[in-house]
Amino acid sequence: MSSISNRTGIVFVISGPSGTGKSSICHRVLEVDPLLHFSVSCTTRQPRKNEIDGKDYFFMSKKLFQEHISNDHFLEYAEVHGNFYGTLDSEIDRITNNGEDILLDIDIRGVKNIQKKYKSLSKPINCHYIFVGPPSFSELEDRLRSRGTESEDVIVQRMNTAKTELTHWRNFDSIIVNSNLDDSINNLKMIIQAQRLSRNVLLTDPWEIN
Ligand code: 5GP
Protein backbone atom coordinates (compact mmCIF):
# COMPACT_ATOMS: atom_id res chain seq x y z
CA MET A 1 0.00 0.00 0.00
CA SER A 2 1.16 3.57 -0.71
CA SER A 3 2.16 5.70 2.27
CA ILE A 4 -0.75 7.17 4.24
CA SER A 5 0.27 10.78 3.54
CA ASN A 6 0.26 10.20 -0.22
CA ARG A 7 -3.22 8.71 -0.59
CA THR A 8 -6.92 9.43 -0.24
CA GLY A 9 -9.03 7.14 1.91
CA ILE A 10 -11.37 4.69 0.17
CA VAL A 11 -15.02 4.41 1.18
CA PHE A 12 -16.05 0.73 0.93
CA VAL A 13 -19.84 0.64 0.76
CA ILE A 14 -21.27 -2.82 1.54
CA SER A 15 -24.90 -3.74 1.06
CA GLY A 16 -27.24 -6.64 0.36
CA PRO A 17 -30.49 -8.12 1.63
CA SER A 18 -30.77 -8.81 5.36
CA GLY A 19 -29.89 -12.39 6.29
CA THR A 20 -26.98 -12.68 3.85
CA GLY A 21 -24.35 -12.39 6.60
CA LYS A 22 -22.79 -9.09 5.52
CA SER A 23 -22.41 -7.81 9.10
CA SER A 24 -20.50 -10.95 10.16
CA ILE A 25 -18.17 -10.62 7.16
CA CYS A 26 -17.59 -6.91 7.90
CA HIS A 27 -16.86 -7.45 11.59
CA ARG A 28 -14.33 -10.21 10.93
CA VAL A 29 -12.43 -8.09 8.39
CA LEU A 30 -12.50 -4.98 10.60
CA GLU A 31 -10.97 -6.99 13.47
CA VAL A 32 -7.80 -7.75 11.48
CA ASP A 33 -7.34 -4.61 9.37
CA PRO A 34 -5.96 -1.63 11.33
CA LEU A 35 -6.35 0.78 8.39
CA LEU A 36 -10.05 0.00 7.92
CA HIS A 37 -12.55 1.77 10.17
CA PHE A 38 -16.25 1.19 10.69
CA SER A 39 -18.52 4.11 9.90
CA VAL A 40 -20.78 4.57 12.92
CA SER A 41 -24.28 5.35 11.65
CA CYS A 42 -27.03 7.31 13.36
CA THR A 43 -30.24 5.44 14.07
CA THR A 44 -33.59 6.05 15.71
CA ARG A 45 -34.01 2.37 16.64
CA GLN A 46 -33.58 1.20 20.24
CA PRO A 47 -30.17 -0.25 21.19
CA ARG A 48 -30.04 -4.06 21.41
CA LYS A 49 -28.41 -5.85 24.34
CA ASN A 50 -24.59 -5.40 24.18
CA GLU A 51 -24.75 -2.49 21.71
CA ILE A 52 -22.74 0.57 22.71
CA ASP A 53 -23.69 4.14 21.83
CA GLY A 54 -20.96 5.71 19.69
CA LYS A 55 -19.46 2.32 18.79
CA ASP A 56 -22.26 0.33 17.13
CA TYR A 57 -24.49 3.31 16.35
CA PHE A 58 -25.19 6.86 17.49
CA PHE A 59 -28.60 6.17 19.00
CA MET A 60 -30.86 9.21 18.87
CA SER A 61 -34.42 10.50 18.95
CA LYS A 62 -36.43 11.12 15.78
CA LYS A 63 -36.27 14.83 16.60
CA LEU A 64 -32.45 14.91 16.63
CA PHE A 65 -32.30 12.78 13.48
CA GLN A 66 -34.67 15.25 11.79
CA GLU A 67 -32.40 18.13 12.83
CA HIS A 68 -29.44 16.40 11.14
CA ILE A 69 -31.58 16.06 7.98
CA SER A 70 -32.58 19.75 8.10
CA ASN A 71 -28.94 20.80 8.57
CA ASP A 72 -27.84 18.61 5.64
CA HIS A 73 -25.43 16.63 7.84
CA PHE A 74 -26.06 13.25 6.17
CA LEU A 75 -24.21 11.79 3.20
CA GLU A 76 -27.25 9.49 2.97
CA TYR A 77 -30.13 8.29 5.09
CA ALA A 78 -33.06 5.89 4.69
CA GLU A 79 -35.95 4.38 6.58
CA VAL A 80 -35.34 0.66 7.16
CA HIS A 81 -37.99 -1.57 8.78
CA GLY A 82 -39.69 1.47 10.38
CA ASN A 83 -36.55 3.15 11.78
CA PHE A 84 -34.26 5.82 10.35
CA TYR A 85 -30.58 5.17 9.63
CA GLY A 86 -28.04 7.66 8.28
CA THR A 87 -24.34 8.21 7.58
CA LEU A 88 -22.92 11.53 8.77
CA ASP A 89 -20.60 13.44 6.41
CA SER A 90 -18.44 14.20 9.46
CA GLU A 91 -17.89 10.47 10.05
CA ILE A 92 -16.52 10.03 6.51
CA ASP A 93 -14.30 13.15 6.75
CA ARG A 94 -12.90 12.17 10.15
CA ILE A 95 -11.45 8.95 8.75
CA THR A 96 -10.68 9.58 5.09
CA ASN A 97 -8.92 12.90 5.86
CA ASN A 98 -6.21 10.82 7.55
CA GLY A 99 -5.75 8.76 4.37
CA GLU A 100 -7.38 5.74 6.03
CA ASP A 101 -10.26 3.62 4.70
CA ILE A 102 -13.82 3.35 5.91
CA LEU A 103 -16.44 0.61 5.70
CA LEU A 104 -20.13 1.47 5.43
CA ASP A 105 -22.68 -1.30 6.09
CA ILE A 106 -25.88 0.25 4.76
CA ASP A 107 -29.13 -0.74 3.06
CA ILE A 108 -29.65 -0.68 -0.72
CA ARG A 109 -31.60 2.60 -0.74
CA GLY A 110 -28.75 4.27 1.13
CA VAL A 111 -26.37 3.07 -1.60
CA LYS A 112 -28.64 4.49 -4.30
CA ASN A 113 -28.76 7.80 -2.43
CA ILE A 114 -24.95 8.01 -2.33
CA GLN A 115 -24.69 7.10 -6.03
CA LYS A 116 -27.26 9.79 -6.89
CA LYS A 117 -25.62 12.45 -4.73
CA TYR A 118 -22.05 11.49 -5.62
CA LYS A 119 -21.66 13.72 -8.68
CA SER A 120 -22.85 16.85 -6.87
CA LEU A 121 -20.60 16.47 -3.80
CA SER A 122 -18.34 19.48 -3.26
CA LYS A 123 -15.52 17.18 -2.19
CA PRO A 124 -15.64 13.91 -4.16
CA ILE A 125 -15.15 10.68 -2.23
CA ASN A 126 -13.46 7.56 -3.53
CA CYS A 127 -16.19 4.88 -3.25
CA HIS A 128 -16.11 1.16 -4.00
CA TYR A 129 -19.50 -0.61 -3.88
CA ILE A 130 -19.69 -4.25 -2.74
CA PHE A 131 -22.84 -6.37 -2.93
CA VAL A 132 -23.24 -9.37 -0.61
CA GLY A 133 -25.83 -11.93 -1.71
CA PRO A 134 -26.95 -15.40 -0.54
CA PRO A 135 -25.95 -18.58 -2.42
CA SER A 136 -29.58 -18.84 -3.58
CA PHE A 137 -32.97 -17.32 -2.88
CA SER A 138 -34.23 -20.50 -1.16
CA GLU A 139 -31.12 -20.54 1.07
CA LEU A 140 -31.92 -16.98 2.19
CA GLU A 141 -35.46 -18.06 3.08
CA ASP A 142 -34.08 -21.03 5.07
CA ARG A 143 -31.69 -18.70 6.96
CA LEU A 144 -34.46 -16.25 7.83
CA ARG A 145 -36.76 -19.08 8.98
CA SER A 146 -34.05 -20.88 11.00
CA ARG A 147 -33.53 -17.79 13.16
CA GLY A 148 -37.03 -18.52 14.50
CA THR A 149 -37.41 -14.94 15.68
CA GLU A 150 -39.81 -13.56 13.06
CA SER A 151 -43.48 -14.21 12.40
CA GLU A 152 -44.64 -15.65 9.04
CA ASP A 153 -45.87 -12.18 7.96
CA VAL A 154 -42.48 -10.61 8.66
CA ILE A 155 -40.65 -13.43 6.84
CA VAL A 156 -42.85 -13.00 3.75
CA GLN A 157 -42.30 -9.22 3.87
CA ARG A 158 -38.50 -9.63 4.25
CA MET A 159 -38.40 -12.15 1.37
CA ASN A 160 -40.32 -9.76 -0.89
CA THR A 161 -37.92 -6.95 0.02
CA ALA A 162 -34.94 -9.28 -0.56
CA LYS A 163 -36.25 -10.25 -4.02
CA THR A 164 -36.34 -6.58 -5.05
CA GLU A 165 -32.95 -5.87 -3.45
CA LEU A 166 -31.31 -8.78 -5.29
CA THR A 167 -32.14 -7.11 -8.61
CA HIS A 168 -29.73 -4.25 -7.76
CA TRP A 169 -26.48 -6.22 -7.99
CA ARG A 170 -25.51 -4.59 -11.31
CA ASN A 171 -25.10 -1.22 -9.56
CA PHE A 172 -22.14 -2.55 -7.55
CA ASP A 173 -18.42 -2.88 -8.41
CA SER A 174 -17.81 -6.20 -6.66
CA ILE A 175 -20.05 -9.14 -5.77
CA ILE A 176 -19.63 -11.59 -2.89
CA VAL A 177 -21.86 -14.69 -2.88
CA ASN A 178 -21.78 -15.77 0.73
CA SER A 179 -21.82 -19.59 0.50
CA ASN A 180 -19.07 -19.97 3.07
CA LEU A 181 -18.17 -17.37 5.73
CA ASP A 182 -14.38 -17.89 5.63
CA ASP A 183 -14.29 -17.68 1.82
CA SER A 184 -16.38 -14.49 1.91
CA ILE A 185 -14.05 -12.91 4.50
CA ASN A 186 -11.06 -13.71 2.27
CA ASN A 187 -12.87 -12.35 -0.77
CA LEU A 188 -13.60 -9.07 1.02
CA LYS A 189 -9.96 -8.79 2.13
CA MET A 190 -8.84 -9.34 -1.49
CA ILE A 191 -11.29 -6.75 -2.85
CA ILE A 192 -10.00 -4.20 -0.32
CA GLN A 193 -6.38 -5.02 -1.11
CA ALA A 194 -6.95 -4.70 -4.87
CA GLN A 195 -8.55 -1.27 -4.45
CA ARG A 196 -5.65 -0.10 -2.30
CA LEU A 197 -3.36 -0.80 -5.26
CA SER A 198 -5.50 1.32 -7.57
CA ARG A 199 -3.98 4.43 -9.15
CA ASN A 200 -7.07 6.38 -8.05
CA VAL A 201 -5.98 6.46 -4.40
CA LEU A 202 -2.68 8.21 -5.11
CA LEU A 203 -2.61 11.97 -4.49
CA THR A 204 0.86 12.56 -5.93
CA ASP A 205 3.49 10.92 -8.09
CA PRO A 206 5.09 8.19 -5.90
CA TRP A 207 8.53 8.98 -7.42
CA GLU A 208 8.15 12.78 -7.01
CA ILE A 209 9.21 13.45 -10.63
CA ASN A 210 6.06 15.25 -11.78
P1 5GP B 1 -29.79 -3.24 12.14
O1 5GP B 1 -30.93 -2.48 12.78
O2 5GP B 1 -30.07 -4.71 12.05
O3 5GP B 1 -28.47 -2.90 12.78
O4 5GP B 1 -29.67 -2.70 10.63
C1 5GP B 1 -30.77 -2.79 9.76
C2 5GP B 1 -30.34 -2.36 8.37
O5 5GP B 1 -29.98 -0.96 8.35
C3 5GP B 1 -29.13 -3.10 7.80
O6 5GP B 1 -29.43 -3.51 6.46
C4 5GP B 1 -28.03 -2.07 7.78
O7 5GP B 1 -27.13 -2.31 6.71
C5 5GP B 1 -28.83 -0.81 7.56
N1 5GP B 1 -28.09 0.40 7.98
C6 5GP B 1 -27.27 0.54 9.05
N2 5GP B 1 -26.76 1.77 9.09
C7 5GP B 1 -27.25 2.44 8.00
C8 5GP B 1 -27.06 3.77 7.48
O8 5GP B 1 -26.34 4.60 8.00
N3 5GP B 1 -27.76 4.06 6.35
C9 5GP B 1 -28.58 3.18 5.71
N4 5GP B 1 -29.17 3.58 4.59
N5 5GP B 1 -28.76 1.93 6.18
C10 5GP B 1 -28.11 1.56 7.30
Image: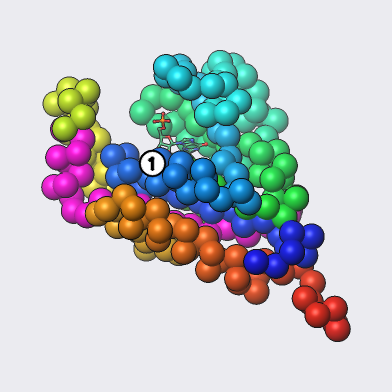
- Closer-to-camera residue (19/6): 6
Query: Height in image: 26 above or below 206?
Result: above
Position of the N terminus, as image quadrant, is: bottom right
Total marks drawn?
1
Which three-letter amino acid code belongs to the residue tagged 1? Ser
At 20% from the left edge and 44% from the top edge, which residue is drawn?
Answer: 140
Specify whether residue 109 is in view: no
Specify whether residue 124 is in view: yes
Query: Is 72 contained in the magenta span?
Result: no
Q: Which residue is mark 1?
A: 24
Residue 199 location (% of width, % of height): 65, 74
User: Dividing the picture into quarters, in which one does residue 126 lie?
Assistant: bottom right
At 52% from the left edge and 60% from the top edge, which residue is drawn?
Answer: 192
At 79% from the left edge and 60% from the top edge, which residue is drawn?
Answer: 5
Query: Is 144 contained in the magenta span?
Result: yes
* Region in magenta: 119-145
Residue farthest toward the bottom in the current orientation of the protein: 209
Query: Height in image: 132 above or below 208?
Result: above
Q: Is residue 57 left or right of residue 19?
A: right
Position of the C terminus, as image quadrant, is: bottom right
Query: Height in image: 11 above or below 92?
Result: below
User: Dividing the picture into quarters, in which one does residue 65 lie?
Assistant: top right
Mark 1 residue element? helix
- Closer-to-camera residue (114/120): 114
At 38% from the left edge and 41% from the top edge, which residue is drawn?
Answer: 24
Ligand 1 in which quarter: top left
Q: Is residue 50 left or right of residue 135?
A: right
| Some atom of ligand 1 lies within 8 Å of the CB belonging to the residue at label 1 | no
Residue 110 location (% of width, % of height): 48, 43
